[in-house]
Image: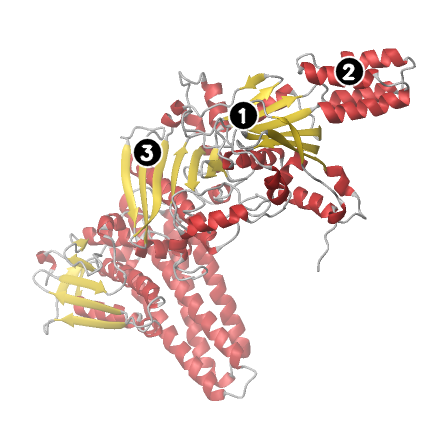
């Protein structure tokens, strides 16, 4: 049987309650859980502030007259404190008969008469409640009720708190606690007094600390009920300024400030009887947001659904107000939030539960005076005061989300890596709302410092990052690109290509050291492919560096840059896979196995070499030239270049064409570009489905027709939502996971089709059973056929 030391209670309290505002929050929650009828009142009565007390202690050492010392102490008492506190303090001081007694009297009066009183008009506690609930740390009564509400899928939780440890937060504020409480059926007040210092004895066991409730005086009115907690022997230096500041900031953000005064939980703060204002967020500040996103994440028919409404109001240059509704359904959310990494289970998209958000973005350089708030300085102060994206559960804050030092969505870190409008945390004023019953897996850490790390918490954060950084951020960037002449930034793509190329070089170098000499031919093929790629990549870098802002050149360079990255990835992947296989086999007597792996490597390298060579026509000078060629042969070559990749992913490819070849006159490189992007996207999405469905057999079907020349490309992957039929062709729109999200491929493919006087569309008539689209149609003009 375990025995518990008394000081464990102090350690538990100090670990759980990390700040004064969290201590108040825990005590406030208890009042609302008791169904308080008039909210919560917090009263500060401080006849002698801590700093003034310390100053008097020092001065007593210099005084020789006892009466003068008493007079100095009494005159130092705050005249605005309650009469009861001042007279009680003075009485203790006057009773001292010596300087030694005076020092003890000052210490005792300071501990007794500086108080924080927290009261509610809730159900109150009986003597039995005090003994069997309040004095039981970790009492299970509320936990059972909350679990019952979860089982019954109630819309609201019966309690804000459930762990039975919130009462320990009183020790954060002071070393003494007096509880005065009564139920409506009680005739007397029930009293309980605790001196937390008793628990500091390092030798005492918990069962040696005797605390018992007792019956107090009669209630003032027969029908009254509620609880008053009087905390004394305070630890902080409470002043009117400090309490006012806390009311204006911490308490203002303790409950949802987006709510109006009528629906917001009532919390009243008093300093020496004078009520301190807890401000409401001004609606005019929200109206002045330069952009915003409002939406909700729901579970509909056991499937996740994300709906967002985006507004872009003012970016500092002339543009119309843009409004957009964005909807993401289950297949897209699986790809966006989990992808092919499977670091969390797909079910977390459901178990995370529903929530809503209301997030406003400000360009602080564009703020102006607002009549309802004040001049520019006042507006900036208001935006800073209400800044941050706060998290609320059942109308109350979840700490520390939204604090100045907290960057729970990694906005600051990611802003440093982006160009254009920075999406850092100081530019936002927003809220996210969850509930205990709706989001049972999003629970606080025991110390109230954030949510516990679970699969649901990871999904929750990813959804919100996607909402802010991608949906809202991309909407802002889209308006900027459309109405303010901006060029495409290739710096991030170039750094990725460099990293991939370095990985391939490193793998080749190590392969040369461990491969058998008789099998060096395969390594030479790999090295040759790498050299060809390096030359091509260097040419691409030079062409990108020389490009000007003319839109056609931008398109061409984006195409080259994207395909360089694709080939670089294949080189790195193939060489690293070969290296891994050889390292597994190098200590084993399996020469045949080594030769087999190298044979696979050799075949892959030939495929990669073909892909490098097939990219040659896409150089700036080469892409401009139209030439006559067989469309059938070009498609076959493109399929052959991906043969190893198709085998690796078990993809069946069906090519359907007429017996007579279809000859066209067009820019060959641009048609290659279209095919490469369609194939790349198809492989990614079919791989996504294959990893989730064991019986799934991925398939690509390509049909070539003449009069006019048409290539129809379709697969049996998860498909595309009809709402995104046109969006997928916009620059930087992507539904891939974070590591693979680029959003240039289909944009470049469509631009390439239009450069050839053709069209690339997503066929809206070819919906599958799931209502999603799978067929792309690339049509060249009749005049191009030879």
Which badge, 1 or 2, comes first in the chain's sequence? 2
Which badge, 3 or 2, comes first in the chain's sequence? 2
Which badge, 1 or 3, comes first in the chain's sequence? 1
Q: Nearer the viewer, residue 666 or 192?
A: 192
Q: Residue, x 48% and y 47% (percent of image)?
A: 145
Mark 3 and 2 residues: CB-CB less than 8 Å, in contact? Answer: no
**Does residue 440 appear in the picture of this structure?**
no
On the rendered image, what quadrant is the N terminus found in?
bottom right
On the rendered image, what quadrant is the C terminus found in?
bottom left
Q: Is residue 747 above or below residue 239?
A: below
Q: Residue, x 80% and y 19% (percent of image)?
A: 92
Circle 2 packing at 10 Å, graded few (<14), some (14-19), many (20+), is many
SS for tag 1?
loop
Q: Is residue 702 above or below residue 325?
A: below
Image location of residue 30, percent across then percent down? 55, 36
- Residue that badge 2 annotates: 90
Circle 3 packing at 10 Å, graded few (<14), some (14-19), many (20+), is many
The image quarter in which residue 296 lies? top left
- Residue that badge 3 annotates: 312
- Residue that badge 1 annotates: 222
Q: Is residue 653 above or below residue 202?
A: below
Q: Is residue 614 above or below residue 752?
A: below
Q: Is residue 482 left or right of residue 776?
A: right
Q: Residue, x 47% and y 83% (percent of image)?
A: 594
Q: In the image as oriented, which residue stretches furthest toward the left?
A: 707
SS for tag 2?
helix
Image location of residue 717, percent across then percent down? 27, 63
């Amino acid at each position: 049987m375990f025995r518990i030391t008394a000081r464990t209670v102090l350690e538990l309290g100090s670990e759980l309650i990390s700040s004064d505002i969290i201590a108040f929050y825990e005590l406030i929650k208890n009042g609302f859980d008791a169904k308080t009828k008039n909210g919560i009142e917090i009263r500060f009565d401080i006849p002698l502030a801590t700093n003034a007390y310390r100053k008097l202690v020092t001065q007593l050492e210099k005084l020789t007259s006892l009466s003068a010392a008493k007079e100095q102490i009494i005159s130092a008492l705050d005249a605005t404190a309650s009469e009861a506190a001042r007279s009680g303090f003075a009485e203790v001081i006057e009773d001292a008969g010596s300087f030694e007694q005076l020092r003890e009297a000052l210490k005792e009066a300071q501990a007794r008469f500086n108080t924080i009183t927290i009261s509610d008009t809730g159900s109150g506690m009986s003597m039995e409640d005090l003994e069997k609930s309040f004095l039981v740390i970790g009492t299970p009564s509320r936990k059972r009720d909350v679990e019952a509400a979860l089982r019954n899928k109630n819309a609201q939780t019966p309690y804000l708190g459930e762990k039975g440890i919130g009462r320990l937060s009183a020790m954060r504020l002071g070393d003494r606690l007096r509880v005065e409480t009564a139920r409506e059926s009680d005739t007397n007040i029930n009293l309980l007094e605790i001196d937390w210092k008793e628990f500091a004895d390092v030798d005492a066991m918990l069962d040696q600390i005797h605390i018992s409730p007792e019956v107090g005086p009669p209630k003032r009115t027969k029908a009254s009920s509620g609880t008053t907690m009087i905390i004394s022997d305070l630890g902080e230096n409470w002043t009117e300024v400090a309490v006012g500041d806390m009311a204006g900031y911490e308490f203002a953000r303790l409950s949802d400030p987006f709510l109006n005064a009528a629906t917001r939980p009532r919390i009243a703060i008093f300093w020496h009887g004078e009520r301190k204002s807890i401000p409401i967020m001004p609606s005019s500040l929200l109206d002045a947001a330069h952009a915003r996103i409002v939406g909700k994440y729901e579970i509909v028919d056991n499937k996740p659904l994300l709906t967002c409404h985006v507004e872009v109001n003012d970016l500092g240059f002339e543009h119309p107000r843009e409004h957009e509704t964005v909807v993401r359904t289950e297949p897209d959310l699986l790809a966006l939030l989990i992808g092919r990494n499977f670091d969390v289970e797909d079910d977390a998209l459901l178990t995370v539960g529903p929530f809503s958000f209301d997030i406003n973005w400000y360009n602080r350089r564009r703020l102006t005076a607002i009549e309802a708030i004040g001049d520019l300085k006042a507006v900036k102060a208001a935006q800073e005061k209400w800044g941050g994206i706060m998290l609320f559960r059942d109308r109350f804050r979840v700490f520390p989300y939204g604090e100045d030092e907290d960057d729970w969505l990694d906005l600051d870190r990611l802003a440093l890596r982006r160009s254009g409008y920075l999406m850092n945390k100081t530019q936002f004023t927003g809220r996210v709302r969850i509930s205990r019953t709706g989001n049972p897996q999003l629970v606080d850490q025991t110390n109230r410092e954030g949510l516990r790390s679970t699969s649901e918490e990871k999904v929750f954060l990813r959804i919100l990052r996607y909402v802010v950084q991608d949906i809202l951020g991309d909407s802002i960037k889209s308006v900027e690109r459309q109405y303010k002449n901006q060029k495409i930034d290739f710096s991030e793509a170039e750094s990725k290509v460099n990293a991939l190329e370095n990985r391939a070089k490193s793998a080749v170098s190590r392969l040369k050291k461990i491969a058998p000499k008789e099998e060096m031919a395969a390594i030479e093929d790999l090295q040759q492919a790498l050299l060809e790629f390096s030359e091509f990549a260097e040419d691409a870098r030079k062409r990108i560096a020389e490009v000007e802002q003319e839109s056609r050149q931008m398109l061409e360079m984006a195409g080259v840059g994207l395909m360089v990255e694709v080939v670089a990835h294949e080189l790195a992947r193939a060489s690293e896979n070969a290296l891994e296989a050889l390292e597994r086999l190098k200590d084993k007597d399996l020469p045949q196995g080594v030769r087999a792996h190298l044979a696979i490597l050799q075949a892959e390298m030939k495929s990669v070499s073909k892909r490098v060579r097939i990219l040659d026509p896409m150089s700036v000078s080469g892409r401009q030239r139209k030439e006559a060629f067989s469309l059938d042969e070009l498609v076959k070559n493109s399929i052959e270049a991906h043969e190893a990749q198709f085998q690796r992913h078990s993809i069946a490819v069906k090519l359907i064409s007429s017996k007579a070849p279809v000859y066209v006159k067009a820019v060959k490189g641009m048609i290659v570009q279209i095919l490469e992007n369609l194939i790349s996207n198809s492989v990614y999405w079919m791989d996504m489905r294959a990893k989730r469905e064991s019986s799934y057999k991925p398939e690509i079907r390509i049909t070539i027709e003449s009069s006019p020349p048409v290539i129809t490309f379709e697969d049996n992957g998860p498909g595309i939502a009809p709402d995104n039929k046109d969006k997928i062709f916009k620059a930087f729109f992507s539904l891939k996971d974070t590591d693979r999200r680029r959003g240039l491929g289909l944009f470049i493919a469509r631009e390439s089709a239009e450069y050839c006087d053709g069209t690339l569309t997503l066929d809206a008539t070819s919906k599958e059973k799931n209502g999603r689209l799978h067929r792309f149609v690339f049509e060249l003009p009749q005049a191009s056929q030879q």
